[in-house]
């Protein structure tokens, strides 16, 4: 458990920006001892910076989703990416690019079912849905599917020993199909990053059409 907590901390510090597609190996350095107050100040600064990055990603995610589905549904799914990754080392973009890779070509439909039986926007296999405490039929529910998908990606991060990029590929599986999936996922990540560059000062607060609650 202690190793897993440390692993999540490493991921959280490395997964915030568009130009860091995978988790780099933590580099240990000798630092002067920090006072308790110093540590609290640093933690607060890191948390606020992380929150600002999350807010900056949200309008770009909704914009990317809106190219594939209705504005209302794009907003709902974007907000789920935001809310369901709170208090995790993942960012909203991490879940958004997976949704686009899995069902972007199917209108981000919650009713999408693959030929292998994967279900929902984030395409959870029945066995994986059950492993996270959900009935497979619940994957048509966007909120539950998002929750299960976050848990699944965290599981894959453990398997990948902290390498987020490899974990995302494992989310699909292994072999040629996973290679093709990875190429597609990266393309969608770049698309979201381009949307962020269009509106560098846009945040969830000053985008009048956004709310942090799914409709």
Image (cartoon, rainbow, N blue to C red):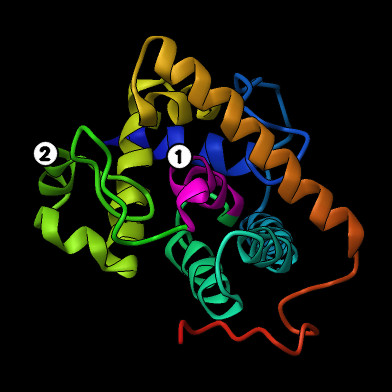
Residue 40: percent from left, percent from top: 63, 62
Q: Nearer the viewer, residue 30 or 56?
A: 56
Res. 89 in view:
no
Q: Residues within 10 Å of mark 1 (few under 14, many from 20)?
A: some
Frontmost of labels 1 and 2 is 2
Residue 8: percent from left, percent from top: 45, 39
What residue is pinned by disc 2?
A: 127
Residue ID at (39%, 60%): 109
What is the tally of numbered marks visible in this picture? Answer: 2
Label 2: how many residues lie within 10 Å, few (<14), some (14-19) or many (20+)?
few
Q: Residue placed at 68% from the left, 58% from the top? A: 64
Residue at the location (60% across, 86% down)? 211
Secondary structure category for the residue under label 1:
helix
- In the rendered image, residue 32, in percent from the top left (x then y), is placed at 74, 35
Quadrant location, the N terminus: top left
Secondary structure mainly formed by the magenta segment: helix
Nearest the viewer among 44 and 61 is 61
Q: Which residue is mark 1?
A: 8
The residues tagged by marks 1 and 2 sit, at their Cα atoms, a distance apart of 25 Å
Location of residue 209 with respect to 124 vertically, above or below: below
Magenta region, residue range? 93-107
Q: Disc 1 vs disc 2: Cβ atoms closer than 8 Å?
A: no
Q: For this rendering, which residue is in front, 10 or 121?
A: 121
Q: Earlier in the sequence, mark 1 or mark 2?
A: 1
Q: Name the outermost residue toward the top.
A: 175
Vertical relation: 96 (above or below) 40: above
From the viewer's perspective, is 8 left or right of 74?
left
Q: Is residue 1 left or right of residue 65?
A: left
Q: Mark 2: which secondary structure?
A: helix
Give the image location of residue 191, x and y in percent: 74, 45
């Amino acid at each position: 458990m202690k190793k897993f907590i440390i692993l999540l901390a490493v991921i959280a510090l490395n997964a915030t920006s568009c130009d860091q597609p995978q988790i780099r190996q933590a580099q240990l350095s000798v630092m002067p001892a920090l006072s308790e107050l110093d540590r609290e100040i640093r933690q607060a600064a890191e948390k606020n910076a992380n929150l600002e990055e999350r807010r900056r990603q949200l309008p770009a995610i909704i914009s990317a989703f809106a190219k594939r589905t209705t504005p209302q549904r794009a907003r709902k799914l974007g907000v789920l990416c935001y809310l369901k990754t709170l208090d995790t080392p993942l960012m909203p973009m991490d879940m958004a690019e997976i949704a686009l890779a899995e069902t972007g070509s199917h209108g981000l439909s919650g009713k999408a079912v693959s030929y292998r039986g994967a279900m929902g926007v984030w395409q959870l296999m029945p066995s994986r849905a059950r492993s996270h405490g959900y009935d497979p039929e619940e994957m048509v529910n966007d909120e539950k599917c998002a929750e299960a998908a976050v848990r699944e990606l965290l599981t894959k991060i453990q398997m990948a020993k902290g390498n987020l990029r490899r974990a995302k590929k494992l989310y699909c599986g292994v072999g040629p199909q996973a290679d093709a999936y990875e190429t597609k996922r990266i393309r969608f990540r770049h698309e979201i990053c381009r949307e962020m560059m269009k509106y560098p000062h846009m945040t969830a607060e000053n985008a009048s059409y956004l709310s942090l609650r799914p409709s």
